[in-house]
Amino acid sequence: MKIKTKLTYGIGALFAMIVLILVVSVTYIRTVSADTRNILAANYNSLSYAKQMIYVLDRLNEDTGARNIFVENLKKQQQNITETDEGEITARLTMHFQQAKDTLTAENIQLLREDLDAIMTLNMSSIYEKSKIAEVTAQHAVLWISLIGAGCAVIALALLIIFPASITKPIKELMDGIVEISNRNYDKRLSIRATGEFRNVAVSFNNMAEKLSEYRQSILADILSAKKYIEAIVNSIHEPIIGLDENRKILFVNDEAINILNFKREEVIGKSATDLALKNDLLRRLVRELIQPGEKKEPLKIYADNKESYFQAKYIPIKVINTGESKEQYIGDVILLKNITEFKELDTAKTTFISTISHELKTPISAIMMSLKLLEDNRVGDLNEEQHALSRSIKENSERLLSITGELLKMTQVETGKLQLNPKITKPIELINYAVNATRVLAERFKCNIEVEYPEKIAKLFVDSEKIAWVITNLLSNAIHYSPENARVIIGAAQVGDKVEIFVQDFGRGIDPRYHQSIFDRYFRVPGTKVQGSGLGLAISKEFVEAHGGTIRVESEVDKGSRFTISFPV
Ligand code: ADP
């Protein structure tokens, strides 16, 4: 049944009940009122006339006024005959009054009194009867009105209980359904037992849920095919690739990664990389490098498919901007392992080549230097000024050549991991003195004033003195080269806590802060540097110092100078 019909029936029923109560009440009130009016008109008047006549009865003979009142009331009584027998008694009263004519005897008066008594008694008993009838009518009225009222109250109460529930129950069911749908339970259906509008709502709701369910299935199919597509792409990449979520759970791996990790696919997908790392060295290193991104990342040497391969790991954080948001949200990482075996092999070939060439060059350069020494010997013959200048130039260039081949050799040692340290206890001043002596000629040539700052008490070092002396010489040589003529250079040592620091400070051109990191890279030279060099000195120095567990750093400002400090644990 429609809500409108329900409302019409409910309110209509109440209206009908109110009308019924009204009709019954009015009818009964009218009946009771008619009864009362009847008593008044019919009986009360007769009693009043009779009473007036009795009042003047004893004065009828002597008082004409009294006689007139009697006659007047008698006439009124004659016109107010309402009861059976009343007409007869009134006729008898008239007859007894007329019989007596002008004079009334005591007997006549007695007869008249009896007639009047009879009229009064008749009317009084009639009043009594009629009031009894009125009382019964009133009782009936009370009974019927109460019965109908009670019936109406019961019906109204039933409407009050059933009617709101019949509306709210389907609404509640609909609301529950909507909540289920919003919780993505698209299998939710509403019962279509309801009638009227709610039946239509339930049918529409069920249609909507059905369509949503179909839609979800089609979306799922789309997502699955997109997932397969992405998996196919990931698998077609011929370099190992691992995808992690923000909690480092493995989301995907391609066959290459599976191969080098030496796991089965089902053993890794959905598992925590941190947990798996406990039993897999390669994954342990990858996770460690992912967590500590600042660490120096050496290529990974992996033995897979019966051959040795080198991989360079790349860690790519994945960030997305969710719909309706403006901030990027981190959702995980992708680890990409680039196979650099080929480059590594080429690099090794290059290093071997440089090493061989440098080694081979050393002998002829030494022979040139030896020949130069002989040439400058007076015993061989005198040289004129021009020849002296030429031999000096050959010597300088040969020295430079020797120093470059020396640096290249050292570099190849570092690159091939053949760096061997022969540490012994050394005083820092010995290393400083060595460097000052080694650069004396250079300093003189540039009229450079080298100052040594050395504290009275300083701990000794346990280092390969040849290599560290080389590092300090290189720093001092740079300080002289990159300072103008007549400049100051300070070299010194200091103990800072449990560390010994050796520093070289110049007041030359300085280094732009942009290059403070790169100057320690192999073959890097600050753009625009005119002084000749290989760009290897600082890179080798760094390797040498770090091989001793020490550090090297630079503080420098353009046009103010630079201060290089090497620091070693005591
Ligand atoms: P090289 O001196 O042979 O070029 P290095 O590795 O010793 O190689 O130095 C790398 C670069 O750092 C140099 O080319 C130079 O531009 C810059 N550099 C090094 N020391 C100084 C210094 N004391 N003052 C200014 N620039 C310097």
Image (cartoon, rainbow, N blue to C red):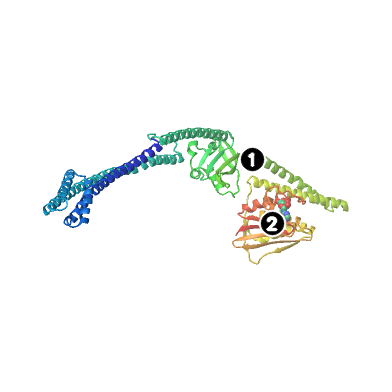
* Residue marked by disc 1: 344
What residue sits right under mark 2 in the picture? 472
Work out which quarter of the rendered image holds the C terminus and state it. bottom right
Q: Is residue 69 above or below residue 261?
A: below
**Amino acid tagged 1:** Lys
Given residues 560 and 137, the one toward you in this image is 137
In the picture as drawn, the residue positioned furthest to the front comes out as 102
Residue at (55% x, 40% y) in the render: 242
The answer to whether residue 44 of the structure is visible from this angle is: no
Give whichever of 152, 511 is nearer the camera. 152
**What residue occupies the far bottom of the structure in this picture?**
456
Is residue 363 shown to the viewer in this render? yes
Camera-near label (2 vs 1) is 1
Q: Amino acid at mark 2?
A: Ile
Residue 520 horizontal/vertical position (percent): 67, 51
Give whichever of discs 2 and 1 has the lower sequence position: 1
List x then y, in percent, for residue 475. 70, 56
